[in-house]
Amino acid sequence: MKAFDFTPRLFESLKNYNKTDFMSDLMAGIIVGIVALPLAIAFGIASGVSPEKGIITAIIAGFIISFLGGTKVQIGGPTGAFIVIVYGIIQQYGEKGLIVATILAGIILVMMGVLKLGTIIKFIPYPIVVGFTSGIAVTIFTTQIKDLFGLTIDNVPAEFLQKLVVYARHFSTIDIWCTVIGILSVAIIAYTPKFSKKIPGSLVAIVVMTIVAYLLNNFTGIHVETIGDRFQINPSLPSAQVPEMSWEVVKGLFPAAITIAILGAIESLLSATVADGVIGDKHNSNTELIAQGAANIITPFFGGIPATGAIARTMTNINNGGRTPVAGIIHAFVLLLILLCLGDLTKQIPMACLAGVLVIVSYNMSEWRTFKALLKGTKSDITVLLVTFFLTVLFDLTIAIEVGLVIACLLFMRRVAETTNISVLTDEINPKHESDIASNEKLIIPSGVEVYEIDGPYFFGIANKFEEEMRNLGDRPRIRIIRMRKVPFVDSTGLHNLEMFVDKSKKEGIMIILSGVRENVLVSLKNSKVYGMVGEHNIFSHINGAVAKAEEIVKQNS
């Protein structure tokens, strides 16, 4: 097994690369670059930074993710999932704080990849993923109401409920032309796929509505707010800047950095898994995490925001013929050319149109059908789903993920504890129903001996109720045989509880014999006091030896 799992797919793809592959990747890269432009701008503005920083993120992070990534077709860049957390960090710590948080998140992602935790991310409960994704979608939608309807509001509160109150108070300031452009943008994006699967609706909406806004602003007395009215766009790549870091800032931003890293890991690996299913490939999750981490470490030095694999752009890449990481690299260069050569044209894009783009993004993120289906599931899944959703909307995404994971873990432990059963046998053991009896004859349990069987993991979730159940099930025998053939593992709490149980049994004059102990469980026992307290001669690999030992002791004492 390799100690370090890092194998970028680019170098593998280039081994048999030819002109036909390049032409397919070139076409896909150009189209994805054009598609990524409005999304990068919209995500940048919605996150609280200038539009060119969204483009810079798509350029630098998109290049690094394709160059170092563990998938053939992944397209990286800013995504809607980060909007809420990025906006919150900027409000509290400013853009310098965002740079620090993103770098920290990148380091965490690299460490996750180095430690081969790529597969562990897949074990995050689905209700948590749907809960915070749907919560993010609702939050994104509410942040776009001001621009969608052209409301006159100086400062929009960050809190969800306060935001709704402010919108209600200022809804009389609605701008009819902004509203028309915003609603038409939503309609164009929604209906374009019915006419063309190749041309993205967001690009059509941006082009059409930019022309409309230009005509209204220059040839009538009407003014529609554009990007240029609110932002100064610098059509060049910025020079690298090293952020100031202090322990206090790092400590304060670390929870947010963990959230960014978890979001980035989940979204990128989910996107890679979906892409695998379409192109019949298998990505390297650990390499992908390292690439995502490298992108988030380097991009902030140039003013970029958090980035990850973007499923919509990845699917656009696949649908237009992209089959190697070269397409993702070309997409980054296309965006660079647009920034350098056509940067001034982006100033003419109306804000209402970008709001319309993000309304569609939030609708697609909402997964309302999945959300509705999960509400018909088990009570534990519904609890995790709703808690994560409402915490995301009403409070903070970091809190939502932390609390959601804690609740999910507690509910999982409860489920495991419920599946771990303890039973008692006092008469005989039928070999037809057992797998660890050395003969085909019934095994008679001697008088004064009870056999207790633990069926399931012996961990802290059930350890505290172990003694109580043992006493409720059985009497007060002379010998207790604890049958552990179905115990896959035992943790430190289980060992401590078992130690106390053995000690208490000895004080009551009851001998303990262990049966069917697995090799890994035996190793744990040897590293604890239990092994010495029970004695090596009273630990058996199968039930026959344990019963024979108990019978021998009973005869000696009778």
Image (cartoon, rainbow, N blue to C red):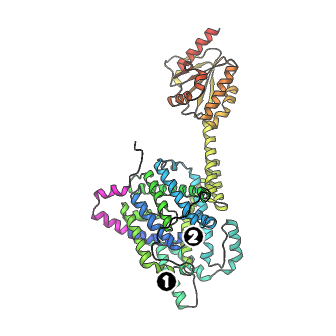
In front: 4, or 322?
A: 4
Which residue corresponds to mark 2? 46
In front: 146, or 538?
A: 538
Q: Main secondary structure of the magenta part?
A: helix
Q: Mark 1 belongs to which amino acid?
A: Ile
Q: Mark 2 belongs to which amino acid?
A: Ala
> Mark 2: few, some, or many residues within 10 Å (few <14, many ≥20)?
many
Placement of 314 over or under 128, stated as above or below: below
Placement of 467 over or under 75, stated as above or below: above
How many labels, in total?
A: 2
Image coordinates for residue 49, horizontal then vertical, percent? 56, 71
Placement of 450 over or under 176, stated as above or below: above
Image coordinates for residue 283, horizontal then vertical, percent? 41, 53
Q: Earlier in the sequence, mark 2 or mark 1?
A: 2
Placement of 391 over or under 240, stated as above or below: above
Image coordinates for residue 94, horizontal then vertical, percent? 60, 67
**Residue appearing at x 60%, y 12% in the figure:** 553
In front: 300, or 202?
A: 300
Q: Which image quadrant: the C terminus?
A: top right
In screen coordinates, is 391 left or right of 107? right
The answer to whether residue 27 is magenta is yes
Q: Secondary structure at mark 2?
A: helix
Which residue corresponds to mark 1? 211
The answer to whether residue 26 is magenta is yes
Would you say the residues marked 2 and 1 are in contact, meaning their CB atoms lie under 8 Å apart? no
For the residues labelled 2 and 1, the Cα–Cα distance comes to 22 Å
Q: Secondary structure at mark 1?
A: helix
In screen coordinates, is 281 left or right of 112? left
Which contiguous range is marked in magenta? 1-28
